[in-house]
Image (spheres, rainbow, N blue to C red):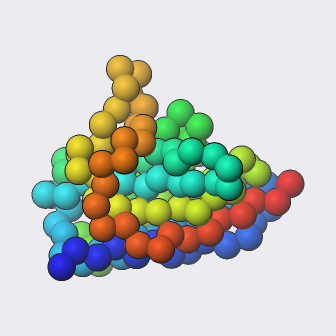
Amino acid sequence: EVQLQASGGGLVQAGGSLRLSCAASGVTFDHDAIGWFRQAPGKEREGVSCINTDGVGYYGDSVKGRFTISSDNAKNTVYLQMNSLKPDDTAVYYCAVDLLNCPYTYSGSYYYTGKYDSWGQGTQVTVSS
């Protein structure tokens, strides 16, 4: 059974950092791409970042240069390091198996497609101004 659980959210001031973790079971990172997406109140879901089966990371336009995705095969965990946080980053963050292996635009930006599997409850990130 595939299970993914996001953790590490919290309250941080603008300009601060957080590291989210996605603990995975029932997946292997060379077979399953892991994506992060977020949802803020009253807004559509947004693709944040994704690491594909070759270990290449992709980022949404709004987080490029600030967020870094990585994976630890030994711990079966994907991390999302979030730096220079802004109030607009406030949302619930979910990790999930990206069934499309991290789709990206012609400019290399990751985007939300809704083609995900096995996301958990998400973790709340709140950035205060």
Q: Spot the residue most to the front.
A: 42
- Residue 89 visible (yes or no): no
* Image quarter hosting the C terminus: bottom right
Q: Where is residue 72 shown, x and y percent of the image?
A: 30, 68
Q: Residue at x 52, y 48 (%)?
A: 45
Q: Spot the residue most to the top.
A: 106
111 or 115, which is in the foreground?
Answer: 115
Q: Where is residue 64 shown, x and y percent of the image?
A: 53, 38
Q: In this view, does 78 lie above or below 84?
A: below
Q: Residue at x 51, y 45 (%)?
A: 46
- Residue 64 visible (yes or no): yes
Q: Is residue 56 shown left or right of residue 110?
A: left
Q: Is residue 104 above or below residue 41?
A: above
6 or 18, which is in the foreground?
Answer: 6
* Image quarter hosting the N terminus: bottom left
Q: Is residue 127 shown left or right of residue 109?
A: right
Q: Which residue is drawn at 68% across and 55% down?
A: 41
Q: Residue at x 19, y 58 (%)?
A: 32
Q: Where is residue 59 shown, x and y percent of the image?
A: 45, 41
Give the quadrant of residue 128: bottom right
45 or 125, which is in the foreground?
Answer: 45
Q: Is residue 23 shown left or right of residue 65?
A: left
Q: Where is residue 94 shown, x and y percent of the image?
A: 47, 63
Q: Is residue 8 above or below residue 41?
A: below
Q: Is residue 61 shown left or right of residue 72?
A: right
Q: In this view, does 90 lie above or below 66?
A: below
